[in-house]
Image (cartoon, rainbow, N blue to C red):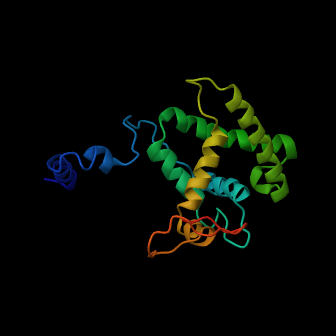
Amino acid sequence: MNRRDALERVALILGGTVIGGAAFLQGCKTQEKKTTGFSLTKDQIAFLDEVAETIIPATSTPGAKAAMVGSFMNTMVTDCYTEKDQKIFAAGLTELENSSSHMYGKPFMDITPQQKTSLLNQVNKELKAYNESKKDGDPNHYFGMMKQLTLLGYFTSEIGATQALRYVAIPGKYEGCVPYKKGDRAWA
């Protein structure tokens, strides 16, 4: 008997306390068979690190590049996205590169941080317009996926949780109402 079977049987014995033993064990794996073998190259991961760093730059705390958000995005898109969304995400990398070349005559990796910010702000306006007119069944926008993965990857990383957010490894008693001063970091 393997571990998966044992956990499923324990879940069944506990009367469903662990809801969906198989889903619990598989995490976010999609039910579709992966035929595409989707994976990003090191250059594409570095590209995503730059996009993420533009969204969450280093300030008094490390930015998204230090949290290796590009590698996180690769893992999430590979393991959790449907083939359709994987294709949209991959096409979005090309779209961003083309937009950079069109606007600045240079690849995204070669433009200045201010130009990267300007480009991503323009793409974000397109995302907002797309979402306002989006109907049920319309595909996701690539930049929406990139932004969501950037935030998820950064704030669930050790750097994001311990340096960008307030973090207590072993908290004391629960306090439902704590004083807040404007500018305080959120709790991890």
Viewer-side residue, 6 vs 41? 6
Viewer-side residue, 95 vs 179? 179
Is 60 placed left or right of 7 in the picture? Answer: right
- In this view, 33 is above or below 117: above
Is 78 placed left or right of 90 in the picture? Answer: left
> Among all residues in the image, which is located at the extreme right?
104
Q: Position of residue 14 (x, y in %)?
A: 17, 50
Residue drawn at x 57%, y 51% as measured from the top left: 41
Q: Position of residue 92 (x, y in %)?
A: 66, 39
Viewer-side residue, 42 vs 86? 86
Q: Position of residue 112 (x, y in %)?
A: 83, 58
Task: Tally the numbered discs.
Answer: 0
- In this view, 36 is above or below 59: above
Would residue 112 be seen by someone viewing this image from the given angle?
no
Image quadrant in which you'd find residue 91: top right
Image quadrant in which you'd find residue 96: top right
Would residue 97 be seen by someone viewing this image from the given angle?
yes
- In the picture, the quarter occupied by the C terminus is bottom right
Residue drawn at x 47%, y 75% as measured from the top left: 169
Q: Position of residue 47 (x, y in %)?
A: 67, 53
- In this view, 109 is above or below 80: below
